[in-house]
Each structure stands twice: as C-alpha cells, then as structure tokens.
Image (tube, helix red, strand yellow):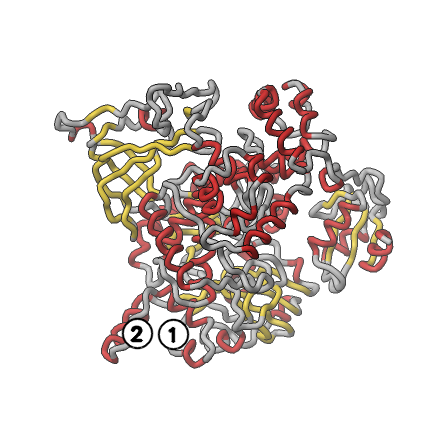
Amino acid sequence: MCCSQDLINCESKESQTLKYKVKDQKRLNDLTRQFLESQSISTKPDYESLVDVLHFHEWRYYVKDDPLLADGEYDTLFNLLKSIEKENPNFIRVDSPTQRVGSDLSSDFPTVIHMSPMLSLPNSYNGDDLRDFDKQIKKLTAVEGDIEYVVEPKFDGGTVVLIYEDDTLIRGATRGNGTAGDEITHNIKTIKSIPLTAHFSDHGIMKAEVRGEAIIRKDRFDAMNAEREKKGEVLFANPRNTATGGLRTKNPSETAVRNIDAFIYQIAAAEGEGADQISNHAESIKILDSLGFKVPRNESKLCVNIDEVIEYCKTWEAKREAYPYEIDGMVVKVSSYLLQQKAGETSHHPRWAMAYKFKAKQATTTLEQVVYQVGKIGTITPVAKVRPVALAGVTVSSISLHNEDFINQKDLYLNDTILIERAGDVIPYVVKSFAELRKGHEKKINFPKTCPINSNQENPINLVRDENEAAWRCPTCVCGSQDLQRMIFFVSKDAMNIDGMGKSIVEKFHELGWLRDISDIYNLNYEKIAQLEGFGERSAEKLQKAIEKSKANPLHRLLFGLGIHHLGQRAAKIFSAEIKHARDLANWSIDQLQELKDIGPVLARNVVEWFTEAKNIELLDRLESGGVNLLQTESDMPKDFSDGPLAGKTILFTGTLKHMGRKEAQKIAEELGAKNISAVSKNLNILVVGEKAGSKLKKAEKIQTVEILTEEEFLKIRG
C-alpha cells in the first residue's frame, strides 16, 4: 500500500493540540480507511502516514470528544504501528504515539503534573507470554523461587488520578500524557464511589496519589440509552466513551447523571512516615478498601506463582461477558514493592506489570490473492488479499504474510479457506489453512525469485536472501522504487528532519524527475518549485531554509538517514562518537566494528558492505559537495562522566525533593559520575534526603559508611 501524506497544522506545540483543516480531515480519513483495509505496512512512507493518522484520531477522540473511529479500529491502527516499529526500529519517530502514553490533554481544562509518571502496560496473549514474563522478573530480581502476583481486571474505561492531602480529596485529573493531565476535580467529586475524605493519616500517610478507572455498569449504560432513545436523543456509543466523555464535560451535573463508578486499583505515590511501611500491592489494596474506596476486592487475587496466575486469567476470560462491567483483559502485577523496585521500568512501561489480553475472536475467509510490497532496503513483503470479513469490530481484507517461510509453514494456497484472528483484538493474523476443505482449484503460492515490483521483465533482478534472515530482498533496484523510499526516509523527522518535505512532496519531485537519489535533495531548483501549483515563492523559500538547515545536522543523523540495513538511531550515535568523518567507516573492518559496544556481526557486515560500494562513496562525495556536514559535531562526541566529583559513587534519593523531580535528580547524579541504585544497603555511598523522608533514612543512619546529604548540599556539588 502506498499512501499520500498530509501536512498538519500544529498551532500549539505546548498543549499538543492539533487543529486540522476540513480538507486535511477528509484526506486523513481516507488514509485511515486504507490502513484499516490493508492492515499491513512495511515501508517507511506508509509508517509516516500512519503516525499522522493516529495523531489526527487522538485529537478527535481526546480533544474534540468526537471520535471518528471505533475503539477497536483505533487499537488496530495503534498496534499496526507497534508491529512495524518492532520489525523496523529505525523507523521510530520521537513523536510516534508508541513513544508516549496516549494523551487526553485539552485546552479546555488546566493542566496539572502528576506526583509520579503514569506508564503504559506491555501486553501478553497466552500462558507462554506470562511464563516468559515470570522468567524475566526472576532474572531482573535474582529470585529463584516462586513470585507472588496480584491479578485484577483490566477495566475498559477512563483513567482517573486522585490526590488526597491531609485526608481530603484536593484534586482529580485525567491520565493525560502520563506526566500531566487535565484537572477535573469538580467532575470527579460528582462520582459517588469516590470518597471526598479518606483517612490516610491512620496509616501515616499525609499525601497520596491514587489511580483508578472511571467506568459505567453495562445495565446502567443500557438504561441510559433506552431513556435517550425515548427522548429522541443521540445514543451513546459505548460505556467507555460515555464514561471518559462524562469526566471531561464542562458541566459537572452532566458527569453526575451518567452514573459513573470508579474502581481504585493503585496507590501510585505517597508521602509521610507510613509511606514506606506498605510493602506490597496486595496490602495497598486492603488499605484502599478500608478507607472506603471501591476496589477490585472480589475480582482480584493474590497468586502464589505464575501457574496460578495463568489459571486465574483463564477463569476470568471464560466469564468476562457475565461481569457487569466492560473488561478487555487482566492486569498481572508483582505484589512486592521491593521486587517491583528491582525489576524497574523503561521510559514506556513498568517491567513488573503486564496486561493479559483476552483471546481474539476468530473467523474463516478465503485467501484470494497475494500482492508484494517493497521497502527502502528492498525487502519484499507478501500481503494476502482475503475475502472481506468482519472480525472483532472491523472488516479485514488484507493480512501480512510476513515472508516466504511463513507461507510455507502455514501451508497456504491461493483460494484456500483459512482461519484468521486478531491477536489481542488488534493485528489480523493467519492461524492456519484448512487443507481438508480444498476442492482442487487451489494453487500453490510460489514466492517470486525476481523482483515483483520491477516492471522491466526483459532485465529481471534476482532476489537474494541472507543466510540468517527470512526476508527476500531486491539487491539492485533498477525501477527506482527503493531510491524513492530511501529519499522519503532520508528527509523524515528522525533522520535529516527536513521540515515541510514529507512523503507527498518527495513523490511529486520524483515524479517530475527532479529527484533520483538523496544528493538531488540539495540541488533543487527553487524557482521551478515556486511555480508549482500549491507552492509559490513563500513555500519554496521555506523549503529551501529547511533543506539548508539540514546541512548542518550532526553526523549521526546523516548516518541513520542513509538507510543502511539494521543501522538504527542508537548504532548511528555509537559510530558517530568514534569517527571524525563519515568516510572513515570505509576504513573499518567487520572485527573492528564489532569491538564497539552493542554492535553485532550482522550490522558490522552491512556497514562494511555499504562503504565498499563505490556508488555509495560517490553519494557521500555529492552530499559533501552540496554542503551537507559529514564531520563529527560536538553533539556526536561521547559523553564521559568518569572524572566527575561523584565518580565511582552510588547514590539514592528519598523523600520529596523541592527543587527538582526524582528523574532530574538522578540525571544530575549521573552527570556527576555517580550510579543510581534503588535500595539502601552496604553498597550505598550517598543518600540524598528530601522532605518527609521515611524508612530509607532510618536504615541509612544505621550504616556508618553512608553519607547523608540534604537536597541543597547535593546541588552544591554540581556548582
């Protein structure tokens, strides 16, 4: 599939509120349908378009409260994005929806900062996934025996973040972007299952942030819609949208009439002497229950090992439809806070928790045709065109077949009856073919041996397949398809970041014959561009400035933008820290490259092969002649904190810091040469104490070798 990309008018970067013109919305809707119909992408241009489509629908859903997609359709697109990013990590844009928690920030409500970041959960779909999760937890925590987990329903509603101070509810907010949310206190107070006062002080807690899910019972939702139908009013779409919309109405009385409940499932942050006394998640749920919160008491279970977790998840999967609230899975959490701390977290998700998604619905259909797509490095991806079939809320007509091995393993023939599913209600997947139903007119799928994209059959290009890869690739593009994809990738945000030169512009210039390879980008005729329909002198000047600006980019952006197979952003930064000029890599051997940390043999071989090609060196020469920087810049140089004032020291922060957040403090510590650790022990050198420090301070005071500093004393070290 090849989709056109629209330019999006972003009027407020601070609020991340995107405003689209009517024509933009129409085009983005058209792109949406194309992606939902194909549900398979492999090229960088299509990836760019998909990111823009998701941004648009987030705006419609979270800001305008007027979604154009069903929840399942959005999930399909989002998980399609995750899939292509998993297969092509070099595609990932910094503004990709996967790189942040989904945002519901709106300019209609004041924005407030959460006490602690709210992260997304990774998904699992079967017992094997959960056992892998258990193995990973044991590896991270160095626990050899069984680990206790709490399993509770994954409610399908709207997240709420509540703050209680001195036993009083002082603020309610939406999830927002994970760091900040919309302040909706007045609406929160109308939800009767949320107590206005809760005696946290009985447990030594003066301030607490709790999280939960606002949700509407199925029977209450049905009753509301029946009443609305009698009055001739527009019916609500589903319980989840009704709950989330009710949270963010400007009139709290509208929230009140929606009969919203709120299940509270976590104490996310706490301050006070008793904050460190709660040792596990199961205990925290009991405390919340005792304080009058509606908690998943009867629905959750403390499981003694992962086998019990799996069994409990299966039990709930069987009875999900009978449960009064909408749930789409179960959440599995390590109960022990100490083990949670040891397991840690990434920038996107905690490593100590996982969502178990209920099985997808399955359907049978007919495999009618196989088409092929090409990527920037020539990867040929087969895509099945199937008889359109409704599946878990969407119509499926295209399914990725990944590669030749997948086709053979599934024993797929044209005209086969096949079983498909949407794993976790997301990406469509071919489960198997029904060989016993074949009638004799089915045909074996023969994967092409020559490039299926090249239209010049007089000089076909034989496909190649590396020994350690499943993909077939076109090694020498003669039709220009790969060159076009490379140029689109080169100008993208994560590569050379040429603002205003998106996919559609590159395709237009390529069609006009102005672009044949990457170096042509720096030799465009702006007078001709100004004469194009839709441009003019001002647009041409703006594009020229963006292209000129890109010439001074750091070396790592150029290396990444070249599209060398397996060379992602991180590897590009590793290389740029070691060389003075891009052409220096032509002098490195495979063995020398592998000596660099995190550089494996496959990438090393690909880099050496790329720099061995004379045409690629000529490309670098043309780029340099065009003014593009090929030299190491200051931002490319490695950062060395080994001579910092805290070099070789371990450090830990506790209590509430007044001048900075916890992550900022940890970053400063690293720049000073220190290593951040998560617990007080004899290995700790420095404990930095903020306000209302708890048990960590008491433990540290008993260890004579630990130096205890105030926040101000720590900041003085930085100078």
Looking at this view, name the residue that lies furthest to the left: 439
Tell whether 268 sits left or right of 312. Answer: right
Q: In this view, does 57 lie above or below 66?
A: above
Location of residue 137 by image quarter: top right
**The disc label shown at residue 115, or none:** none
Secondary structure beneath dot 1 equals: loop
Q: How far apart are marks 2 and 1 (CA)?
A: 9 Å
Tell whether 432 sits left or right of 76. Answer: left
Which mark is first along the chain, 1 or 2? 2
**The disc label shown at residue 259, or none:** 1
Identified by mark 2, the residue type is: Met
Query: Circle 1: is it few (<14), some (14-19), or many (20+) Cα within 10 Å?
Result: many
Q: Are marks 2 and 1 in contact (CB under 8 Å)?
A: yes
**Camera-side residue: 370 or 27?**
27
**Camera-side residue: 566 or 502?**
502
Give the quadrant of the N terminus: top left
Q: Mark 2, mark 1: which one is toward the viewer?
A: 2
Secondary structure beneath dot 2 equals: helix
**The disc label shown at residue 224, or none:** 2
In the rendered image, residue 408, in percent from the top left (x then y), is placed at: 31, 24
In the rendered image, residue 662, in percent from the top left (x then y), is placed at: 70, 55
Residue at position x 71%, y 54% from top?
664
Query: Circle 2: is it few (<14), some (14-19), or many (20+) Cα within 10 Å?
Result: some
Residue at position x 31%, y 33% from top?
371
| Residue 82 showing in the rendered view | no
Q: In this view, does 543 lie above or below 157?
A: above
Residue at position x 37%, y 20% from top?
460
**Camera-side residue: 261 or 82?**
82
